[in-house]
Image (cartoon, helix red, strand yellow):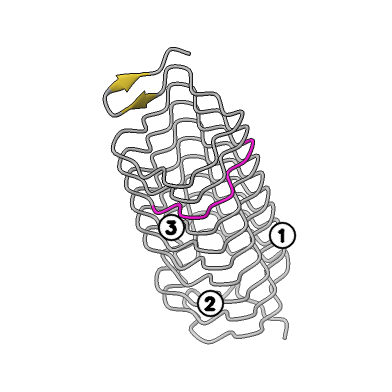
């Protein structure tokens, strides 16, 4: 189904819609049903998608800069999408594919990302406070300066990731794999490291239980 939204400011029911490369920048799409929709390469910068359903949607390469995505994106394909400064607070991204996407300074506080693929993502300066990141793949991701306070990272794969100056205070890293990760000057106060793999990780300047690791 191919649709022309140029004359429509508010659309509610578009499951399976073909909106590839559509210009939806700034559109008011609160509560819209885009389950399984094709949105590859679409322009959704500044779009308002609060409460929308994008479950299983294909958003490959989408422009979502500063978009309001406090929505359901479970199982969605967001590979190589640009979500710079996007609002994803409390969003459901369980099982979503965000491989090599840009989430610089995005807000993901309280979001649900269990089982998601974030391999190679740019999450520099992102807010992930209290996020559910159980079992996520964050290998080779850039989390420089990210806020992961009290995030749940049980069983997460964080190998070779950059966590320089990241705030992990109160986070749960039980069973996580941080082999080869860069934790230079990261805050690891009051965290759960039960069964965590830190082989080859850089811990220089890392704060652990109010103690500074110098080597």
Q: Residues within 10 Å of mark 2 (few under 14, many from 20)?
A: few
Q: How much space separates mark 2 and mark 1, taking CA atoms?
A: 20 Å
Q: Which mark is residue 41?
A: 1
Q: Residues within 10 Å of mark 3 (few under 14, many from 20)?
A: many
Q: Measured from the top left, where is residue 167 in percent x and y?
A: 37, 34
Q: Measured from the top left, where is residue 96 in percent x and y?
A: 59, 65
| The stretch drawn in magenta includes residue 155 | yes
Residue 80 or residue 93, whichever sits in front: 93
Residue 83 or residue 201, whichever sits in front: 201
Q: Residue at x 42, y 53 (%)?
A: 108
State which region is magenta.
152-160
Task: Name the residue beneath numbered marker 3.
Answer: 88
Q: Earlier in the sequence, mark 3 or mark 1?
A: 1
Q: Residue at x 58, y 81 (%)?
A: 35
Q: How much space separates mark 2 and mark 3, taking CA atoms?
A: 25 Å
Label 3 with label 1: CB-CB less than 8 Å: no
Q: Earlier in the sequence, mark 2 or mark 3?
A: 2
Q: Does residue 19 sit above or below 24 in this rendering?
A: below
Q: Nearer the viewer, mark 2 or mark 3?
A: 3
Q: How much space separates mark 3 and mark 1, taking CA atoms?
A: 19 Å
Task: Give the quadrant of the N terminus.
Answer: bottom right
Query: Is residue 20 rendered to the left or right of residue 125?
Result: right
| The stretch drawn in magenta includes residue 191 | no
Q: Residue at x 51, y 32 (%)?
A: 163
Q: Measured from the top left, where is residue 64 in percent x and y?
A: 56, 55
Secondary structure character of the magenta stretch overall? loop
Q: Could you say whether the residue bearing mark 2 is in a helix, strand or loop?
A: loop
Q: Earlier in the sequence, mark 2 or mark 1?
A: 2
Q: Nearer the viewer, mark 2 or mark 1?
A: 1
Task: Name the residue beneath numbered marker 2.
Answer: 8
Q: Does residue 57 sit above or below 160 in this rendering?
A: below
């Amino acid at each position: 189904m191919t649709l022309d939204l140029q004359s429509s400011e508010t659309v509610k029911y578009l499951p399976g819609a073909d909106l590839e490369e559509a210009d939806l920048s700034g559109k008011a799409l609160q509560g819209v049903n885009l389950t399984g929709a094709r949105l590859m390469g679409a322009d959704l910068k500044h779009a308002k998608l609060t409460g929308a359903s994008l479950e299983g949607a294909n958003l490959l390469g989408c422009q979502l800069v500063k978009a309001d995505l406090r929505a359901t994106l479970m199982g969605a394909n967001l590979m190589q999408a640009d979500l710079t400064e996007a609002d994803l607070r409390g969003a459901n991204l369980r099982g979503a594919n965000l491989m090599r996407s840009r989430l610089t300074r995005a807000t993901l506080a309280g979001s649900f990302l269990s089982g998601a693929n974030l391999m190679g993502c740019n999450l520099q300066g992102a807010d992930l406070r209290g996020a559910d990141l159980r079992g996520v793949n964050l290998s080779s991701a850039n989390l420089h300066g990210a806020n992961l306070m009290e995030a749940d990272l049980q069983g997460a794969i964080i190998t070779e990731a950059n966590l320089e100056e990241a705030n992990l205070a109160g986070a749960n890293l039980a069973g996580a794999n941080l082999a080869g990760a860069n934790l230079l000057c990261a805050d690891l106060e009051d965290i759960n490291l039960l069964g965590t793999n830190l082989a080859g990780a850089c811990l220089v300047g890392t704060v652990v239980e109010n103690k500074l690791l110098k080597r």
